[in-house]
Image: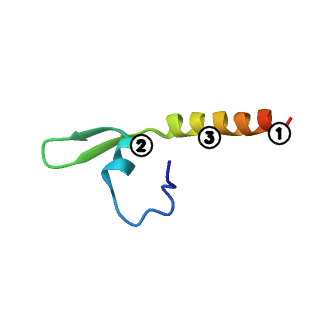
């Protein structure tokens, strides 16, 4: 996954990887549910994979 922190524009790939749900409410308010937990879990698994290889 590309880093979200260095993104300069919102691409479909970035949306697919970081946004779980978009709700548009009456009146135009938008609510986003992010996949932070998913990204965190992927990061933890990647670290574990690297640690295993380095043993």
Front residue of 49/24: it is 49
Look at 65% across and 33% down and name the residue there: 45
Rounded to the nearest whole Å, what is the CA distance between mark 1 and mark 3? 17 Å
Mark 3 touches mark 2? (CB < 8 Å): no
Residues packed near mark 3 inside 10 Å, few (<14), some (14 to 19) or many (20 plus)? few
In which quarter of the view is residue 25 placed?
top left
Residue 43 marker:
3
Q: In terms of depth relative to the viewer, which is nearer, 9 or 35? A: 9
- SS at badge 1: helix
Q: Label 3 to label 2, Cα distance in Å?
A: 13 Å
Residue at the (31%, 50%) spot, across then down: 12
Q: Which residue is mark 2?
A: 17
Pick whichever of labels 3 and 2 is earlier in the sequence: 2
Distance between the Cα atoms at labels 2 and 1?
Answer: 28 Å
- Relative placement, left or right, of 41 versus 47 is left
Q: Which residue is mark 1?
A: 54
Q: Secondary structure at mark 3?
A: helix
Please tell me whether mark 2 sits on a helix, a strand or a loop. Answer: helix
The numbered mark, 1 or 3, whose residue comes first in the sequence reads: 3
Q: Tell me the residue at 78%/36% (across/down).
A: 53
Question: Residue 30, percent across and down?
Answer: 25, 47
Estimate the x, y position of residue 44 in percent, counting from the top left.
66, 36
Residue 50 point in image, percent of width and height: 74, 39
Name the residue located 65 percent from the left edge and 38 percent from the top edge.
46
Q: Relative to 37, is 29 above or below? A: below
Q: Give the class, few, some or many, for how many residues have Cα within 10 Å of label 1's Cα (few <14, many ≥20).
A: few
Quadrant holding the C terminus: top right
- Vertical placement of residue 9 versus 14, above or below: below
């Amino acid at each position: 996954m590309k880093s979200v922190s260095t993104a300069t524009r919102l691409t479909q790939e970035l949306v697919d990887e970081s946004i779980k749900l978009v709700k548009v409410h009456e009146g135009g308010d938008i609510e986003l549910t992010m996949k932070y937990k998913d990204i965190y879990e992927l990061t933890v698994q990647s670290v574990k994979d690297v640690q295993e290889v380095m043993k």
